Amino acid sequence: MNTDVLIVGSGCSGLYCALKLPRDIRITLITKSDLESNDSFLAQGGMCMLKEQSDFDSFFEDTLKAGHYENDKESVGIMINSSPEVVKDLVSYGADFARNDDGSLAYTREGAHSHNRIIFHEDVTGKEITSTLLAQVKKLSNVTLMEYTTMVDIIERDNKCYGAIIRKQDGTLEKVTAAYTVMACGGVGGLYRFSTNFRHLTGDSLAIAKKHGIELKNPDYVQIHPTTFYTKKHEDRSFLISESVRGEGAKLLDKNMNRFVDELLPRDVLTGKIREQMKKDGTDFVWEDLRTIPRDELVSHFPNIIEHCKEMGYDVFKEPIPVVPAQHYFMGGVKVNHHSRTSMECLYAVGETACNGVHGRNRLASNSLLESLVFAKRAAGQMAELGFVNDEIAAKKAADSIDLADYSDEKAVEREYRKLAMEAIEGRTSVGIEETIESGIAYIQA
């Protein structure tokens, strides 16, 4: 198979990248599961936006402070300044965000934000954005969508990417050559016992990058979300209790129902405080009380959370709910520049797969959707600027050098890639990994 651009992943970054590419090129977009099973669909709280220029310095400082000042400042500036245009695009595509009575966008606040700057759609903002993008992509005649199709490896020669090897739904292997390949494969939550991520997100891009000597950046920076619903029942993933809940006034309580912490601390700091309280109380969770939020606001803003808690036997209008930290986000990843290009020619990475340094050591709440969209758009822009000429002779030579039989044992490939991904994450000691282990969020054994 031959295509101009191969995009691996159907989250918001992969979809937006496809939408921003020229309409006269061939795009193939593959996804490991179905088109909607990605973490972009799970994002609850909202998406940050520079609502007025006077908020730039505060937005910038909040992002750096949350990231322990390890952020790439240029990336942060690009993300913030690009946000109004991204939101304009989303609205033009049909995304529906909460509005005030006068029709203006409504903004909420979350942990470590000094001002309200987060747009939202109830408590399913990611689903609203990503489903809107998916609907637009489905209208494009130049885009081929392939579900249940896995990137098994990349096709490369002399540090230039010529496409990828894919395993299709029926198990057959195929070589796909492309002028550009975009890894939009999501995060690493599938490697962990407790995570808010989909289980099939196992850091494939991280493993492939490590295998081919592609540069990584901060692969040990793994974020733990402070509040996921605690249950003894086995679930595929932990249910997130959005940071917006605390932004709107929910309180965290110890076993004696006493408030013990400032709920709007940065995620990593708050996670540490919760762990300390759990240890002190001898419990596996703390309580979160949503009754401090006005009932009308709770009903209109958090219907999904209310319903999930009800299904689990808790009435948020009458009682607090049990919450516990769980693995949530990957700040590190495949190292990219400000146009999302990796250290390998013709290979790009966007979304949670990539690391442009914007988040530093710890991501500020609701910057993930924005960062994914901004830098996916920049990747598309640079590819369009460079052109889509594929060296067919070199591509064929690179593809012909690969024996598909080497990838015939699917389980063996999965084990190898899990091992490579975990080795990358554990490459050097960091507070992120220590918190992960100490929180009891152990790896699933390869």
Image (cartoon, rainbow, N blue to C red):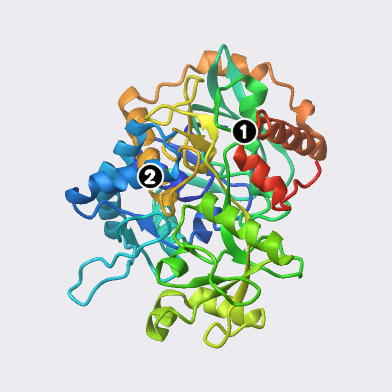
Q: Amino acid at mark 1?
A: Leu
> Which badge, 2 or 1, comes first in the chain's sequence?
2
Horizontal side, residue 284 vs residue 262: left or right: right
Local secondary structure at mark 2: helix
Q: How many marks?
A: 2
Judged left or right of residue 444, residue 202 is left
Label 2, residues with CA under 10 Å away: few <14, some 14-19, many ≥20: many
Asked if labels 1 and 2 touch by Cβ distance under 8 angstroms, the answer is: no
Q: Is residue 202 visible?
A: no
Marker disc for residue 231 = none
> In which quadrant of the rendered image does the N terminus lie?
top right
Disc 2/disc 1 C-alpha distance (Å): 25 Å
Comparing 277 with 325, the one in front is 277
Badge 1 crowding class, 10 Å Cα cut-off, few under 14, some 14 to 19, many 20 or more, is many
> Which of the two residues, 27 or 38, is positioned nearer the viewer here?
38
Name the residue carrying label 2.
63
Q: Position of residue 285 (x, y in %)?
A: 67, 66
Quadrant of residue 156 in the image? Answer: top right
Q: Which residue is mark 1?
A: 206
Q: Is residue 199 visible?
A: yes
Q: Quadrant of the C terminus?
A: top right
Q: What residue is shown at x 76% (from left), y 66% (from top)?
A: 234
Query: Which residue is painted at 42% across and 85% down in the image?
Result: 295
Q: Secondary structure at mark 1?
A: helix
Residue 305 spot, x, y in % from top left: 53, 74
Task: Tell which tag, 2 or 1, sits nearer the viewer.
Answer: 2
Give residue 274's position: percent from left, percent from top. Answer: 60, 60
Indicate the position of residue 14 as horizontal and vertical percent values: 47, 44
Please, what is the three-letter code of the amino acid marked with disc 2?
Thr
Kindly indicate the quadrant of the structure image that contains residue 37: bottom right
